[in-house]
Each structure stands twice: as structure tokens, then as C-alpha cells.
Amino acid sequence: MSSDKEDVKEVRGLKLYKKKHKTIKKLLKKTSTPEIHGDKVWFSSYIIMDYLLENPPETNSRIMEIGSGWGILSIWCAKQFSAEVIAVDADKNVFPFLHMHAELNNTSVKTKVSKYEKLKSGLLAQQDMVLGGDICFWDELIGPLYTLIKKSLKNGVKTIVIADPGRSPFLKLAKKCKKKFNSELLEVELKNPVKEEGYLLVIKNK
Ligand SMILES: C[S@@+](CC[C@H](N)C(=O)[O-])C[C@H]1O[C@@H](n2cnc3c(N)ncnc32)[C@H](O)[C@@H]1O
């Protein structure tokens, strides 16, 4: 895919298309544009990248990103840690954005259309880590995510990391997790590409 240099920026060693890039503009205008907020890269993904730089997974780890949107976190994990990554989202319309960024960064990531609650035990059992940036933004998502976390731990996922700007459904989810799982909620500061504050929910298998 061709890319005009000025329409590409670099963040955390990844190349990202700017919103003014012609293919991005075209995809966002189509009737098949993302419908559940997967229409840009959200800063929570960068919070997870910073956490993983401090707490790196083993090389070749198997990582699932849920609510991946454009999948920038997935692509970064594939490049940074040679991880085997699967990006999951309920909205199939996010994946053209993911694939064009994977191609731009000379890497590949598997994709799957699925809601959180529909992910099967067999697939979860193949993962070392489950990650998600800004994925708990409605109260209706708390139950499905809690169930997914429980199922992931039962199936041997070692670490689950969810980042968020601090939305109330996420904080409720964190409170539920604190009661039942080996989890911690960390307040974090993001310095780049934007200055923001947010939270990390880190859940580890006992
Ligand atoms: C706010 S966006 C965040 C996207 C990405 N993680 C990021 O940081 O840029 C939330 C994403 O979650 C997806 N999503 C919403 N509800 C979902 C569900 N029940 N199951 C799976 N994905 C869902 C949306 O389609 C969207 O791509």
C-alpha cells in the first residue's frame, strides 16, 4: 500500500497513518466504518505498551488483544516481543485499519470477530496474556468482561492487563476483580504521544 510520508507518524517505534491519510479518510467515510468506538487509536493502548516495556512478556509469548480496534497494541507486541498475537473485536469494520497498519509495519497479526463473552475456553487456553485498552466503557460490558477474565484465569492465562482513562464502568470492573482475583489497580501517567492520566488493571493467575 502506498503511503505519502507526511501522512505517517511514528509512535513507540511504530508507523501510524494520520487521519488525513487518503485510505484512512476513505475507510472512515464508508458505510462500513467502525461502529463501537473503534474509529481511532485510543491512548489506553500506549499505557499498556509502557507497562509491557517495564514488565516484558517472554519472547514468542502468545498474546490476545480484546476490543483491539485498529490493533496498534497487537502490532507493537508482535514487533517488540516477537509475540504470536491474535486481535479480537466485535466489530469487523476495525480490521481493515489493523491490516493496513500491520502491512505498514511489516508484520502480521491474526484477527477474530468476537464479543468478549463469546470467546471459547480452547482459544483462551492457548494464550499467555490477555490485553485490552479502553474496552470497558458501558455498564453492560462489565459482566461480559468479568466473565472473560474468570474464564481466562481458569484456562491458564498468566496475566491480564486492561488500561483505561478512568471511566466509571472500568472502575466498577476493577472493584469486582479486586474482590475475587489476584489483581491490582495502578494509577499511571502517560507522557507521550499525549499527556494523559489513566489506570491499569493488572490481574495475575495465582
Ligand atoms: C474505545 S475502542 C478501543 C480500541 C483499542 N483498544 C484502542 O485502544 O485503540 C473499544 C473497542 O472495543 C470494541 N468492543 C466493544 N464492545 C465489544 C465487545 N462486547 N466485544 C468485543 N469488542 C468490543 C469496539 O468495537 C472497539 O474497537
Image (cartoon, rainbow, N blue to C red):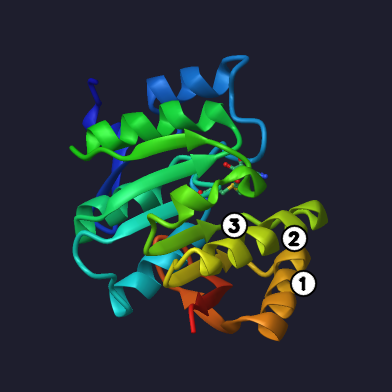
Which residue lies at the image location 59% right of the left edge and 61% below the top edge? 151
Q: CA distance from mark 1 to mark 3?
A: 14 Å
Tag 2's secondary structure?
helix
Which residue lies at the image location 43% right of the left edge and 44% below the top edge? 87
Residue bearing mark 2: 142
**In front here: 4 or 128?**
128
The disc labelled 1 sits on which kind of residue? Lys
The x, y position of residue 106, in whole percent, is 18, 37
Residue bearing mark 1: 172
Q: Is residue 123 left or right of residue 8?
A: right
Residue bearing mark 3: 134
**Ligand 1 sits in which quadrant?**
top right
The disc labelled 3 sits on which kind of residue? Asp
Depicted 96 relative to depicted 17: above or below: above
**In front here: 19 or 79?**
79
Can residue 162 be seen? no
Can residue 138 be seen? yes
Which residue lies at the image location 51% right of the left edge and 32% below the top edge? 94
Depicted 113 relative to depicted 186: above or below: above
